[in-house]
Amino acid sequence: MSRPPRKKAARKSPGERAAEITDAARDLAREQGLTAVTLRGIAARIDVAPALVAHYEPNMDALIAATFATIVAAEIEEVDELLASLPTPTARMAALIDTLLDGTRDDVTVVWVEAWGLGRRNDALAASVREQMDAWQEVVQGVIEAGVASGEFETPDAASVAWQLLGMIDGLNAQALVRWGDARARGSLIGHALEGMLGMRRGALTGA
């Protein structure tokens, strides 16, 4: 079956075209995952020839890395704003667990899971993943250190607790993508574990 001829792409400035490609890559990644960010996928999205995309983005590995960073940095900024609005470290930690495990961020979870796999062969993406993991650890560690300072948490090593918490969140969220285990229990599982790591009373984070 023949395909209808593609309309000639509207003339746009280099800046407009580059921004269009960047936005298309981001939207594709959020809707279908990083593996959808290809020359053909982006070209179809904005209805241009793949060669035009290649002209503006000759290095797809770099575009994928930048797309990943854009998506994750936006999530971190959003969560940072949420935490800043809450009065205590305990409230911030409870909100952090809730927002990262309630299933509303599964599109970002898919991006993370694919980035870990694709990063094995994409050095630019691997570097971006490490950078964003460091950024997440800084957010979590900051909440823990504030809780230690206020007497709400007890731990001699906030960095290690932050690292362990992120590992547990990532693991449970990845499992939820394939519907393994009880997704509704993710928050309470992490909350109870964190209560123990931070010397808190049972139910301080989960309300149990």
Image (cartoon, helix red, strand yellow):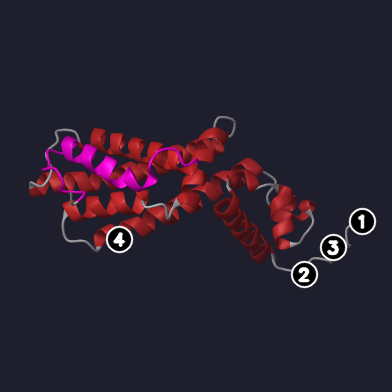
Q: Is residue 196 left or right of residue 62?
A: left
In what element is the residue under mark 1? loop
- State whether residue 119 is above or below residue 31: above
Mark 4 surroundings within 10 Å by alpha-carbon count, few (fewer than 14), some (14 through 19), many (20 or more): some
Label at residue 6 = 3
Give the quarter of the image for residue 189: top left
Query: In front here: 171 or 27?
Result: 171
The residue at which mark 2 appears reads as 10
Return the disc, 3 or 4, that comes first in the chain's sequence: 3
Is 200 one of the magenta-colored residues? yes
Return the disc, 4 or 2, that comes first in the chain's sequence: 2
Q: CA distance from mark 4 to mark 2?
A: 40 Å
Label at residue 82 = 4
Classify the position of the N terminus by image quarter.
bottom right
> Residue farthest to the top?
120
Residue pictured at 33% horizontal, 44% vertical: 186
The residue at which mark 1 appears reads as 2
The amino acid type found where label 2 is placed reads Ala
The amino acid type found where label 4 is placed reads Leu
Q: Are marks 4 and 1 in contact (CB under 8 Å)?
A: no
Which is closer to the viewer, label 2 or label 3? 3
The amino acid type found where label 1 is placed reads Ser
In what element is the residue under mark 2? loop
Q: Is residue 91 left or right of residue 178?
A: left
Q: CA distance from mark 4 to mark 1?
A: 51 Å
Residue 13 picture location, percent across and down = 70, 67
The magenta segment: 178-206
The amino acid type found where label 3 is placed reads Arg
